[in-house]
Image: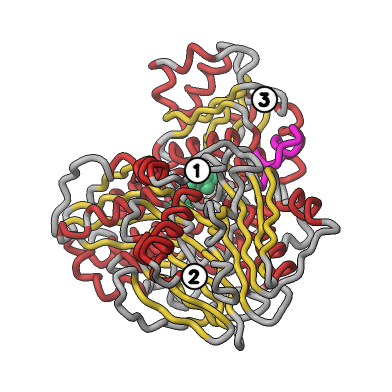
Amino acid sequence: MCGIVAYVGDRTAYPILIKGLQRLEYRGYDSAGIALMNGKTNIYKCKGKVKDLEHLVKDQDISGSVGMGHTRWATHGEPSDRNAHPHQSMNGKFIVIHNGIIENYAHLKKELTNRGYSFNSDTDTEVLANLIENVYLEQKVSAELAVRLALTRVVGAYGLVISSPEEPGMLIAARKGSPLVIGVGDKEYFLASDATPIIEYTDQVIYLNDEEVAVISRQGLDLKNIYNDTKTPEIKTINLSIENIDKGEYEHYMLKEIHEQSNSITETFRGRIAMDESKIFLGGILDVMHKLIDAKRIVIVACGTSWHAALVGEYLFEEYARIPVEVEYASEFRYRNPIVDKDDLVIAISQSGETADTLAAVRLVKDSGATILGICNVAGSSLSRETHAGVYTHAGIEIGVASTKAFTSQITVLTMMAFLLGNKRQVLPAADYKALIHELIQVPDKIAEILKEEKNIEKIASIYKDVTNALYLGRGILFPVALEGALKLKEISYIHAEGYPAAEMKHGPIALIDESLPVVVLAVQDRSYEKMVSNIQEVKARKGKVIAIVSKGDKVVKKMADQVIEIPNCHEALSPLLSVIPLQILSYHIAVMRGCNVDQPRNLAKSVTVE
Ligand code: F6R
């Protein structure tokens, strides 16, 4: 949450910052601001989006080849001009942009107030700016040392860029918990929360580690941790191109990403399935395979959509690898005293690899002896660095705030892992293993078929666009898909929606059903089909409206439902991958028809780096 971008070099900083902020806007869009250094410092900031900032700076001095920019997702203090970043310390010695939360800010603020400091905003970031300044002035140390000393007093998470007008031409970057990437050019450096603002300038990057502080100027880069130990920067090459972050012909990123799913799933299994379809290879977990084979239990931790993928994983691991699974909200798990030991396998799933709660859950079990795996979409992310091993989803960058292609790629990885472990543990016969792999590689073509149904789904969206509530029902492996369908609808269209296991309907939610309630049912040909038919009858008997996702050629549900969306027949294990696609499309069109900003829904941010 919050996007950070900064530049030091010979170019004019402003266009780099603005373009960078536009790319980072998915991380928060409550306010935007920039600081430009050109002998003097100009700070421009306002409530609203990057386009409001662009409007604000029209006819202003935007020169300078050192600068920083910020797009905010509000934590401390409402979205407003005064709470927008950058923040300046009281005596103007430091300018700070920040992604994260300073947890002990109230205590620090009190201390600084007692020392005569006053504050212009409600933010924790301004407290930090003043703390650094206080250390700088009282201890008469360099700006860099003041930053490091101040950070030893901070509890919480930060991705920071700091400049000191007294040492112009220099930026100080620091990180703990919130991501920060340094792009390395020729006598120029770029800083950003992710690599998207820098890819047209350089593919050489350094991912800052926790508690590291980098001092950057045209002359070079110095890296230390906050305790003054010198660190060697590890430069990596990133593989990301402009096309990956362009909307192309699509009106929204979300629609583009929905349509990318045949390809993104193909990317997820590219190079991981033998040509003769007899084997799955997952290179990232080879070294720990013996531990996975012997695991007594799997605990999966995740949040939001990734948690729904985890629930699908639970069905898959139990069914095909015969390993008991527990799925936990990372945010709950981290505050319990969970029982995890060396025979457990802990899997953390996160698109961004930066979700604060998921990372905290991983850290909590680090000393348990359990093997910890990450399933993650972002190479070099914190999760990929804090787990013993893992599998990248390779879905490609996901920019729409509502997760779509990352979800199906996560499920694809979990499916491959479950089949592979089933085979290695000798609980999945070789012939079944091969047959399942064969079914899996048909999925991209089947998704392409579903995507052709978009016009039909759009018509259904137009019928239900004005509803205030919706219910999603599924059973077995499709129950998590019901949850995901409901989440997609509520987060982008602001319609209240609930996902339920269909059999639970009688235990309460059935009271909601009347002629105004649309009920989306997942009624494909699987072991629960007959039971879903009964559930549909129960909804219809109470005059509910039924939108059914059915297998191609279905005749029974077709007669009962108000609308049906057909998906190709597939093996039950793979039905989540197909049945979620129409739900994503339905939510998308309903949200667009309601005039909602689907790519940047209110109050949300893509990467939840604060708890
Ligand atoms: C919903 C959505 C969120 C994320 C959740 C976890 O569409 O995107 O619910 O799934 O914030 O994020 P990651 O997967 O990055 O850990």
Read off the residue under disc 2.
172
Report the quarter where the C terminus lies.
top left
Q: Which residues are magenta?
A: 587-599
Marks 1, 3: nearer the viewer: 1
Q: Which residue is mark 1?
A: 118
Alpha carbon separation for disc pair 3 and 2 = 60 Å
Q: Is residue 247 magenta?
A: no
Mark 1 to mark 3: distance in Å? 63 Å
- What amino acid is at disc 2? Ile
Q: Is residue 597 within the magenta segment?
A: yes
- Mark 3, Cα crowd under 10 Å, few <14 / some 14-19 / many 20+, is some
**Mark with earlier residue (3, 2):** 2
Between label 3 and label 2, give the one nearer the viewer.
2
Q: Which mark, by number, is residue 562?
A: 3
Q: Is residue 231 above or below residue 497?
A: below
Q: Position of residue 587 (x, y in %)?
A: 64, 38
Which mark identifies residue 382? none
Q: Is residue 482 above or below residue 360?
A: above
Q: Quadrant of residue 326?
A: top left
439 vs 70, nearest the viewer: 70
Does mark 2's beta carbon lie closer than 8 Å to ligand 1?
Answer: no
Task: Give x and y (percent) for residue 252.
Answer: 72, 51
